[in-house]
Image: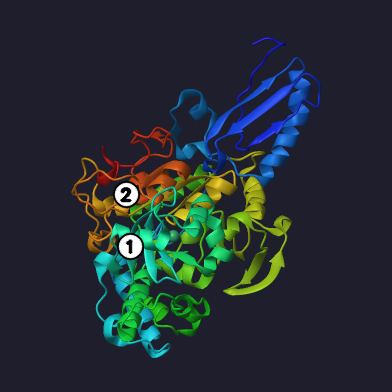
Amino acid sequence: MTAKTASVVLRLGLSAQLSAAAGPFRIVIESGGSGGTLRPVLLEGTRLRGLLGDKLRRLQQLQCIRHYSRYSANRIMTGSDTFRFSDYDCIGFDLDNTLLRYQIGNMIELEYRVMSKFLVEERGYSEKYLLQPPDLDFLQKGLIIDFQRGNILKLGPDGTIHQATHGTKKMAEAEIMAYYGDEKKWEVTTEYCENMLVAWNGPLSEKIRTVLDYFDICSTLLFGRIIDTLDEEAHERIGHYNVWPDILDALIHMYSRDHFDQGVGGYFQALKQNPEKYLLRSSPKLVSWLRELKKSRTTFLVTGSHVDFANFTASYALGPDWRELFDVVVGFAKKPGFFTGAKPFVRLEGAVETEPLEASQLERNQIYSQGNWRDLSLLLERVSRKDHPRFLYVGDNLIQDVYTPAKFTKADTVAIAEEMAAEGMKDHPHHLHPDAPYLQSQFWGSYFVTGSSPQQQEEPSLWADLIKRYAKICVPSMDEVARYPMDHSYNSFTESESCADGYYPAEPMKLVN
Ligand SMILES: [Mg+2]
């Protein structure tokens, strides 16, 4: 490399072309659009050093308002990449279904019971289908509800509707085309696939809802059964429905944070009375792994649960000293908005929220409520005593815990997908999940592919694609990583279509070529 010509590869994920305001210099940044694909950044010129100062400051400013690439320089240069927990200074975790595992089968049965009872007794829906035992084969994470049409959809990465039901009745391909056009695409879900946060609290949240974890997974079955009933009563397909607000009310009734203390709603009482029926104790190996991690890294917990419920579940799973495992604990964090918004942190006295706090008022070894990533990262920077710490976040909710932090912050992510264990993995066909019948679906096919044919090789589902693009690695549970020391080196996901790297202990069976 000479002073006359130079090229520098930078880790920036934005599309921009800056003209040579500083003379005969050229900066080209190429990005593959919204997909986050990054091309090298080329700087050419004779006064490279001076240019770097000015332009990089500008680029960093731009970077603050655009998304970040998750690809490291190593990935760009060599096409392969590795991942180690020990490469990160600040490591954070979601609680539910991440550090704390549930007995998913019992939980789903409870949720279905509580919600169906609410819909029959409080909203007057017919009990004919709603009060039947849940059809477990209909349940799958990641399905999308089309409120107005009464349909439930399974999408591919580009938004194509590969499978759909009206109510609980499966549609033939021609019927999907009749609803959504020959391309089997709907502008709402296509926009959603381009920016998933638009359906969180934007205008699209009035049209669609994705069931993303085991807390709302019953919503599709309840919705489908109500649509079946309404059509049957009308002796025709009604075509336009307004059922979702009632199901949302059932979810709110079940999970309202005040209901834990007040003992109403049915859900929290059941967990309080029989925690052993619904919660699993985390393995001693995982607890020691977290203890070991905290010795040399800054650790934090960010959970959507209010602090009283989080204390109840975390004490059960991780032990009464669970708070010692983390430098900072955040409860009632409104993910995914936590990672993109500016809601202030709120001080807690016991479980009562008192006053909003500035970033500078936050301290180590505290529990806070609400808040936002920007303020938390400033605190983590202080606690870790690093100027530019590397952040990692681990969670099971692919939009809240993986997509949003990976796309909108500097954090890398690890995804948890229990479906890997339930469906079986390459060379691990018997790695069975105790609640596999609740996680497997013949009806919809594998969670990781779009189709439902047991024989055919199908294309990856929207969710398998998201995992590959936004997570470093994906595991069925935290126990999988607790088996190894912190500096264990994993091959992480790469852009290569055929590469199976990134899933541990092995690729999901349906993704094996
Ligand atoms: Mg979770």
Q: Position of residue 282 (x, y in %)?
A: 35, 58
Which residue is located at x 40 percent, y 84 percent? 118
Look at 24% across and 77% down and name the residue there.
133
Instruction: List the residue tagged with mark 2.
Output: 449
Within-10-Å neighbours for mark 1: few <14, some 14–19, many 20+: some
Nearest to the observer: residue 63 or residue 329: 63
**Disc 2 residue crowd, few under 14, some 14–19, many 20+, Cα 10 Å:** many
Residue that mark 1 sits on: 175
Label 1 or label 2, whichever comes before in sequence order: 1
Number of residue marks: 2
Question: Is 314 on the left or on the right of 139, as rendered?
Answer: right
Q: Residue furthest right?
A: 22
Q: Amino acid at mark 2?
A: Val
> Can residue 277 be seen here?
no
Q: How far across and how far down the image is residue 213, in percent?
A: 40, 62
Q: Residue at x 36, y 49 (%)?
A: 461
Give the quarter the ligand 1 occupies. bottom left
Determine the CA span between mark 1 and mark 2. 21 Å
Q: Nearer the viewer, residue 428 or 306?
A: 428
Regarding mark 1 in the picture, which secondary structure is present there?
A: helix
Do labels 1 and 2 touch, CB within 8 Å? no
| Residue 193 in sight in this render | yes
Q: Quadrant of the N terminus?
A: top right
- Quarter holding the C terminus is top left
Q: Quadrant of residue 222?
A: bottom left
Mark nearer the viewer, 1 or 2: 1
